[in-house]
Image (cartoon, rainbow, N blue to C red):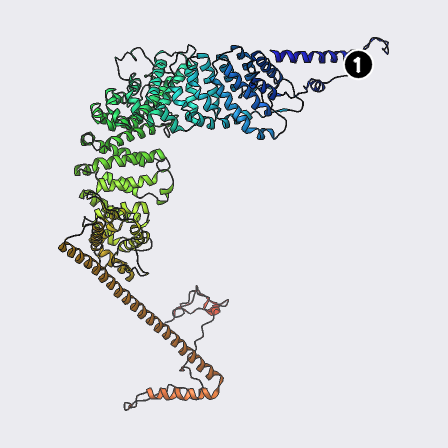
């Protein structure tokens, strides 16, 4: 290359001079030993500084005038020499300030290439300079010339229009070098290269990627140019900004539609798939998928995939095949009709099932999976494709014709022998779980195929194996195997999920077949086993299994009394055990909240309606547990719990349980229901005063939320706002419960509770008035004027509803006044009691003062004495019997006022005479001598009569 030769020529004299300087003179001041003396040592740094180029600016304006001048524009040879001179002058990099002039020269030269092919080599040499870093004189030049550089790079992409394969390839190579930039050949004095990412940023700003995508139409007939351009686009698609630019130019559609172009090397397919991957990952996904949904792109994907699947034998062929399958899956998730119209969906179904169901299709006649990693991934991707296709009902017939249900049921069986399917144990477990998960989406659409394949029998047998104790232990390494390591929980989880999806269809044939095969007792046994497991409370998988079991039982037992009887006392015991779970676990995040809802649903579906189960439920204090759950006041659960209470109220034995129940604060059930009513009305914004009294007689039940909704006429088949409100809140259910237990003589209610209860008792009348009010509003909104008789009837109904509201409000006022009077009376009684207590204290204080006066004042003492004697004398009878002797009970000359009388002082015998409490003191029978100061028995003493 000329630049390399120039560098070599410049370096030669410098190296020669350095060698000369290191040699010692051979005459003069030589030492006797004849060794040379080094006079100067040149370091590498100094050598590089000597090699630095003194860069001289080039007058590009003169060159531009040479190309554009009216007298010099046809001097082709001079033009080519100028371009060669520019490529030599800027061989170390182009100055940022000179970039616009160079691009102008390239654009002028590009117009002349078609007539003068000699321009190709000089233009390529100048384009090659763009692979080098640009040179800046100041640090601010990158910002100063940013717009100029962006426009220049955009124009560089526009040079792809030049009708020269060599120029186009060179442009692609120069842009590709943006990602692996070459270093400057020699340091340039006074200039520094731009940063590594500067060109990439400017290319994004200038929209180079969009320009190159538009150039695909130019190079589609030249393999070399197309490969070079795809290589550049593959590099550019690594950033989100470039992907947006490419998507704006419809890069996905342009590239995907040409996947099958002739290419012996296979690079077109490889690089195109990589670009599509980057666009889907980094670009606007929805826009890219919409472009790929083109029928032409689908056909190209289909042909490429089939060719790689049937003919590809190399490792990278299988990888590329899987990449195309993922792209096809993304397309199918958003646009399935093109997949069906092109026949791609039918072929994918065939490829997903050919190894399980024999087919005579020539595409799979000699096709066999090698059970390597790529084939394993493809099998899983095909299962996933079946799930995606099943979301469109137009694919149901394709799935049926492909015998998808039969193929997938091939995996619903016990894993007794490892390796029998040629797959390793871990991979076969992954495929088995994935197949069962796929069946959960496909089987509900193909119920007839499910019945034909005896799906219920297969699933129940598989569940029986899942509960058995054998030597199989799950690996738990895959996504679907979560929580299944060392057990069969994953298999049980997905088989129950499959059964749940099938019974959810509501096909009576399937549900009856399950009951005939004893599914209810088997499911109850599994439920009992999972509840008794030590990990049941902390294992999310086991909690999900319990939820699915309860849901399946609810669906099966709901419509049939005989099935509810089969649920029986065993099921009731399990339900009660689940209802007693700790409420603090509802928020654990493991699924206890779902479990409690499924349990309540099971109570409603499997117990209510069967009198024997209801009686057993009440006998086991199930109603108390239901009321305890209602007392928790969980907004999401109240509606369901109240619905169960309403249903149970049809059983006469329920009333005694409701009236007997007491909450933690000793509150009764009516009190709890009234509190829930007040809370509901507060949330709805119903207008009430501080006592709960009706304020708006025309709208006694309407809340602020309902009132703010704009009224719009509804068709006759639709429910109005007033009717929808009945189902949305709990007031109707509370009214139904009070209708069963009564509105009077209820335990635990205060006077203010009865104020609210008066509204509850008239709920049905208020709701009827509200509906008639809506009818009037709807007639007015539709400009319909009723006939005179109908108008009078509407007026009468409106007045009657308003009068009821006023009557209830008056009754409420009376109750409130009576309550206030009662409170006032109680207050007065309390004050009287306080007053009596204070009077007693005054009497005690007065008595104490008198006592002090008697002890400190002698005259007061004598006065008190006289009063006492007088009182005693007056209390004695005046008439005395004859011949009787009266003894005085008073001691004369006492100056005391306390009670007095004869006093006898008894002194105890000293213990020295008795010998203490443990001594034998039978003094009446024995004469005991005194020895040692104590009474003791003496031998030889005769008894004296």
Q: Who is closer to the viewer here, 802 or 777?
A: 777
User: Mark 1: which secondary structure?
Assistant: loop
Coordinates of residue 263 in the picture (x, y in percent): 41, 11
Residue at image x 29%, y 68%? 822
Quarter of the image for the C terminus: give it.
bottom left
User: Residue 939 appears at what percent x and percent y?
Assistant: 44, 64
- Which image quarter: residue 560? top left
- Residue sticking out furthest to the left: 789
Q: Quadrant of residue 123?
A: top right
Looking at the image, residue 586 sits to the left or right of residue 559; the answer is right
Q: Which residue bears the numbered disc 1?
A: 38
Q: Give the vertical position of 596 relative to 201 (above or below).
A: below
Binning the other alpha carbons within 10 Å of mark 1 as few (below 14), some (14 to 19) or many (20 upward) gives few
On screen, 511 above or below 867? above
Q: Position of residue 545 (x, y in %)?
A: 31, 33
Is there any visible trace of residue 601 in the rendered image?
Answer: yes
**Percent position (x, y) of residue 186?**
64, 18
Q: Nearer the viewer, residue 510 or 321?
A: 321
């Amino acid at each position: 290359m000329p630049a390399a030769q120039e560098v070599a020529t410049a370096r030669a004299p410098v190296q020669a001079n350095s060698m000369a300087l290191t040699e010692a003179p051979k005459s003069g001041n030589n030492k006797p030993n004849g060794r040379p003396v080094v006079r100067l040592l040149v370091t590498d740094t100094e050598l590089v500084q000597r090699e630095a180029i003194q860069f001289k600016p080039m007058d590009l304006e003169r060159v531009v005038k040479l190309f554009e001048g009216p007298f010099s524009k046809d001097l082709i040879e001079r033009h080519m020499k100028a371009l060669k001179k520019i490529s030599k002058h800027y061989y170390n990099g182009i100055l940022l300030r000179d970039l616009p002039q160079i691009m102008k020269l390239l654009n002028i030269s590009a117009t002349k290439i078609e007539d003068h092919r000699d321009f190709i080599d000089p233009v390529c040499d100048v384009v090659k300079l763009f692979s080098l870093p640009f040179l800046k004189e100041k640090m601010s030049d990158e910002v100063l010339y940013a717009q100029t550089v962006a426009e220049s790079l955009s124009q560089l992409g526009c040079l792809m229009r030049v009708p020269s394969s060599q120029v186009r390839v060179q442009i692609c190579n120069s842009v590709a070098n943006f990602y692996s930039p070459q270093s400057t050949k020699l340091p340039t004095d006074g200039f520094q290269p731009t940063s590594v990412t500067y060109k990439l940023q400017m290319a994004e700003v200038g929209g180079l990627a969009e320009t190159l995508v538009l150039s695909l139409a130019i190079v589609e007939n030249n393999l070399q140019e197309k490969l070079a351009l795809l290589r550049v686009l593959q590099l550019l698609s690594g950033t989100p900004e470039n992907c947006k630019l490419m998507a704006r130019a419809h890069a996905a559609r342009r590239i995907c539609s040409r996947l099958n172009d002739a290419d012996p090397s296979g690079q077109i397919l490889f690089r195109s798939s990589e670009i599509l991957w980057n666009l889907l990952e980094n670009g606007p996904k929805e826009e890219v998928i919409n472009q790929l949904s083109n029928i032409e792109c689908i056909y190209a994907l289909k042909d490429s995939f089939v060719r790689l699947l049937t003919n590809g034998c190399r490792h990278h062929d299988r990888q590329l095949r899987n990449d195309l399958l993922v792209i096809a899956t993304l397309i199918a998730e958003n646009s399935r009709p093109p997949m069906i119209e092109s026949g791609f969906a039918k072929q994918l179904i065939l490829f997903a099932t050919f190894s399980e169901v024999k087919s005579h299709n020539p595409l799979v006649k000699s096709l066999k999976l090698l059970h390597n990693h790529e084939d394993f991934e493809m099998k899983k991707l095909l299962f996933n494709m079946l799930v995606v296709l099943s979301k469109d009902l137009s694919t149901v017939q394709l799935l049926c014709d492909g015998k998808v249900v039969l193929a997938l049921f091939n995996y619903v069986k016990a894993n007794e022998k490892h390796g029998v399917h040629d797959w390793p144990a871990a991979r076969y477990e992954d495929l088995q779980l994935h197949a069962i998960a796929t069946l959960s989406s496909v089987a509900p659409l193909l119920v007839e195929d499910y019945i034909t394949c005896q799906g219920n029998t297969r699933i129940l047998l598989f569940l029986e194996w899942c509960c058995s104790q054998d030597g199989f232990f799950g690996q738990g390494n895959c996504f679907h195997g979560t929580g299944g390591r060392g057990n069969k929980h994953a298999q049980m989880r997905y088989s129950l999920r499959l059964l749940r999806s099938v019974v959810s269809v509501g096909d009576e044939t399937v549900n009856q077949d399950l009951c005939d095969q004893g599914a209810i007792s088997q499911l109850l046994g599994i439920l009992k086993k999972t509840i008794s497991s030590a990990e049941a409370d902390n294992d999310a998988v086991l909690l999900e299994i319990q939820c699915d079991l309860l849901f399946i039982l609810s669906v099966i037992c709901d419509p049939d009394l005989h099935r509810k009887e089969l649920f029986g006392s065993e099921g009731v015991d399990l339900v009660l055990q689940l209802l007693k779970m700790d409420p603090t676990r509802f928020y654990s995040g493991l699924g206890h909240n779902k479990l409690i809802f499924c349990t309540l649903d099971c109570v409603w579906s499997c117990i209510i309606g069967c009198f024997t189960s209801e009686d057993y439920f009440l006998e086991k204090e199930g109603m108390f547990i239901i009321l305890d759950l209602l007392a928790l006041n969980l907004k999401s659960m109240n509606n369901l719990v109240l619905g169960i209470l309403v249903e149970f109220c049809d059983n006469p034995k329920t009333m005694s349980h409701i009236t007997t129940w007491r909450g933690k604060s000793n509150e009764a059930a009516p009190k709890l229901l009234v509190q829930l009513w007040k809370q509901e009305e507060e949330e709805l914004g119903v207008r009430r005063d501080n006592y709960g009294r009706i304020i708006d007689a025309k709208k006694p039940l309407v809340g602020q939320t309902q009132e703010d909704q704009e009224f719009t006429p509804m068709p006759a088949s639709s429910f109005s706002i007033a009717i929808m409100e009945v189902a949305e809140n709990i007031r109707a259910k509370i009214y139904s419960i009070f209708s069963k237990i009564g509105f009077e003589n209820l335990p635990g209610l205060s006077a203010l509770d009865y104020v609210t209860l008066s509204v509850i008792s008239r709920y049905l009348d208020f709701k009827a008035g509200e509906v008639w009010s809506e009818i009037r509003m709807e007639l007015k909104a539709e400009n319909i004027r009723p006939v005179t008789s109908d108008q009078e009837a509407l007026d009468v109904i409106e007045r009657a509803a308003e009068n009821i509201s006023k009557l209830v409000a008056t009754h409420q006022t009376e109750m409130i006044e009576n309550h206030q009077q009662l409170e006032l009376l109680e207050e007065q009684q309390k004050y009287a009691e306080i007053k009596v207590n204070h009077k007693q204290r005054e009497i005690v204080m007065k008595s104490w003062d008198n006592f002090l006066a008697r002890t400190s004042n002698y005259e007061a003492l004598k006065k008190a004495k006289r009063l006492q004697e007088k009182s005693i004398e007056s209390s004695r009878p005046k008439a005395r019997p004859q011949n009787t002797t009266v003894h005085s009970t008073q001691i004369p000359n006492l100056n005391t006022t306390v009670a007095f009388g004869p006093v006898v002082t008894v002194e105890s015998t000293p213990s020295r005479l008795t010998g203490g409490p443990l001594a034998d003191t039978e003094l009446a029978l024995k004469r005991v001598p005194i020895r040692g100061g104590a009474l003791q028995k003496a031998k030889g003493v005769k008894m004296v009569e």
